[in-house]
Image: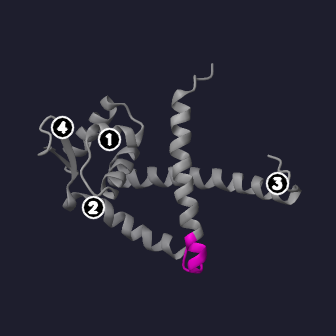
Amino acid sequence: MTDVRGPRRARLYEELSTESRRYLASYVLFNQAVADHLGLHPTDVQALSLLTAEPEPLTVRQIADMTGLTTGSATRLVDRLERGGYVTRTPDRRDRRRVLVTPVPERVARVAAVWDELGRTWQRLYDDHTEDELKTIIRHMRHANALSRTQIEHLRTMPRPD
């Protein structure tokens, strides 16, 4: 990638691109290791993470939208999580046609305990950063998350390469 602002910035973009690929790959592999440790599928671990980050229970359709799964695949994911005792399905009191998927706190605590143990080590990565640097990292993550959602939608509309 070249940049009109100069070769130094172009080199930094290239280095950032390389480190980003390494970071993303390491996160995927880390997620797989956590899932293996818990006896879960990696998608199940991420779905639990998303479910517990939301203030209210979600429908299967909302889970499908958040994960990019079809509603059939999201239903099978919820089936697995329900069999494992991680979630319950309950009728929505406001709309009896809808079913809400709710995390089971006691069971999710098992996953949280693993994340908490590992999280202390991860948090030490940030210990030597200033508050302004932490704010920059948070801003970057929010922007990257939004861009990722946009790119995912774009990829879903593109024809597959031959």
Question: Crowdedness of circle 2 by 10 Å Cα count: few (<14), some, many (20+)?
Answer: few
Magenta stretch holds residue 142: no
The residue under label 3 is 10
Residue 109: x percent and y percent?
26, 63
User: Quarter holding the C terminus?
Assistant: top right
Q: Residue at x 32, y 55 (%)?
A: 54
The residue under label 4 is 98
Q: Amino acid at mark 1?
A: Gln
| Pointer 3 with pointer 4, Cβ within 8 A | no
Question: Crowdedness of circle 3 by 10 Å Cα count: few (<14), some, many (20+)?
Answer: some
Q: Residue at x 59, y 68 (%)?
A: 136
Q: Amino acid at mark 3?
A: Ala
Q: Identify the mark nearer the N-term, 3 or 1.
A: 3
Mark number displayed over residue 110:
2
In terms of secondary structure, where does tag 4 sit? Answer: loop
Judge left or right: residue 107 versus residue 48. Answer: left
Q: Identify the mark nearer the N-term, 4 or 1.
A: 1
Question: Crowdedness of circle 1 by 10 Å Cα count: few (<14), some, many (20+)?
Answer: some
For this rendering, which residue is in front, 54 or 25? 54
Q: Identify the mark nearer the N-term, 1 or 2.
A: 1
100, above or below 142, in the image: above
User: For the view shown, which residue lies furthest in the right direction?
Assistant: 7
In terms of secondary structure, where does tag 1 sit? Answer: helix
Whole-number angstrom distance, CA of label 4 to CA of label 2: 28 Å
For this rendering, which residue is in front, 36 or 1? 1
Q: Residue at x 56, y 40 (%)?
A: 151
| Pointer 3 with pointer 2, Cβ within 8 A | no
* Residue 84 shows in this picture: no
